[in-house]
Amino acid sequence: MILVAGGTGRLGTLVVGRLLDQGLDVRVLTRTHDRADHLGPKVDVMIGDVRDPDSVRRAVAACDVVVSAVHGFAGPHGNSPSSIDRDANASLTDATKSAGADFVLMSGVGAASSSPIELFRMKWAAEQYAASSGVPTTIIRATAFMELWIDILRKTATRSGRPLVFGHGDNPINFVSVADVAALVERAVTDHATRGEILEIGGPDDLTFNQLANAVQTADQRDRPPRHVPPLILRLMTATVGRLKPELGRQASAALVMDRDDFAFDSTAVHARFPWLASTSITDALAQVAHRPSAGKEPTSTAKAPGRHSVGTD
Ligand SMILES: NC(=O)c1ccc[n+]([C@@H]2O[C@H](COP(=O)([O-])OP(=O)(O)OC[C@H]3O[C@@H](n4cnc5c(N)ncnc54)[C@H](OP(=O)(O)O)[C@@H]3O)[C@@H](O)[C@H]2O)c1
């Protein structure tokens, strides 16, 4: 049995599909039934919260491999990088150790104790915890998921016809397709030779947000330039609304860093190691995303899942 914590999300959904296609038994841990409907009847759905160690222990029980594809960047309600990316991942590591299973941890390129982005500091803490736990662990660090940013740019263009870029938008950033990341996660689950490794994956394109926004516009047959949230407003957001809604403060603060620091990436190493791994371009992803509903909104399966268990509080 493979547990995918975060199996309902953008990446997790693709990972679950790939593992099922391999004929493996898959369990997901999610906070609400509805979030797992699109995964279909073969998935063992457990209801629980990764912040609750009992939930985690029960979800991990009898599993051979545990995949962590959760994050707390977007909040809300007590979800945060410290509660999810650091502490819940530590909980998952402990439970994985007790179960004698292997661990595959999703992290981000740039994870470091000194990162100006809280999420990356918490991912680094999770990496350190897993690496020193004795649990056979593969860490996968990915750059920004291009499909997420294409969706954000498209959504913000809905009314005005002009996507919204946070900051100046002229800093090159590496974008990777979530489909390529899912292929690497599947490999990590099944390939014990990757234990003890940190695999870093990026895509073929370093693009500025202005370039990405223009590519989205072209794909959608629009030609108006993007709108911008100036850095000054982002700074004000971190100091004002960010105090009341920490997730908004985190997003504004991360946007400022992404507008300024080095987010380029050379993905040669991972493709030399796994030559079969696809390297999807922004152009190809734009063509695919145009026709694909987002993970949480995929068609609801009418079939009933074989097992839905609550692991939250009982
Ligand atoms: N997005 C990116 O650009 C990017 C880049 C590099 C690395 N990553 C990493 O890749 C992984 C997947 O990211 P994603 O963008 O695919 O995520 P996503 O679509 O936002 O999904 C997040 C997942 O986390 C789960 N989750 C969050 N809080 C939870 C809680 N308290 N209890 C149980 N489950 C919880 C959600 O489950 P429910 O809502 O069903 O409960 C959901 O399945 C994450 O580890 C992320 O840090 C992402």
Image (spheres, rainbow, N blue to C red):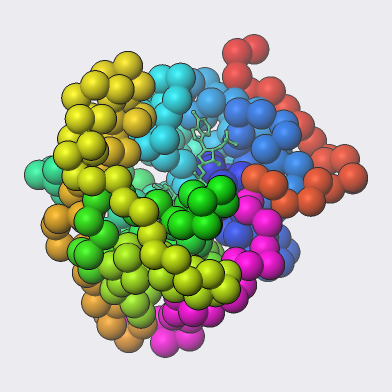
Q: Is residue 24 above or below residue 296?
A: below
- Give me the residue at 23% from left, 37% from top: 233
On whether residue 47 falls in the magenta region, the answer is no
Q: Which residues are magenta?
A: 273-295
Q: Residue 140 or 239: which is nearer the viewer?
A: 239
- Give me the residue at 34% from left, 71% from top: 211
* Number of numbered discs visible in the structure rendering: 0
Is residue 259 something one can see in this rendering? yes
Q: Is residue 8 above or below residue 236?
A: below
Is residue 187 something one can see in this rendering? no
On whether residue 285 falls in the magenta region, the answer is yes
Q: Residue 107 or 209: which is nearer the viewer?
A: 209
Quarter of the image holding residue 175?
bottom left
- Give me the residue at 61% from left, 72% from top: 288
Q: Position of residue 227 (x, y in %)?
A: 36, 54
Query: In the visual, does 295 lie left or right of 200?
Result: right
Query: In the visual, does 250 lie left or right of 239?
Result: right
Quarter of the image holding residue 142?
bottom left
Query: In the visual, does 295 lie left or right of 271?
Result: right
Q: Position of residue 250 (x, y in %)?
A: 29, 34
Q: Position of residue 110 (x, y in %)?
A: 21, 55
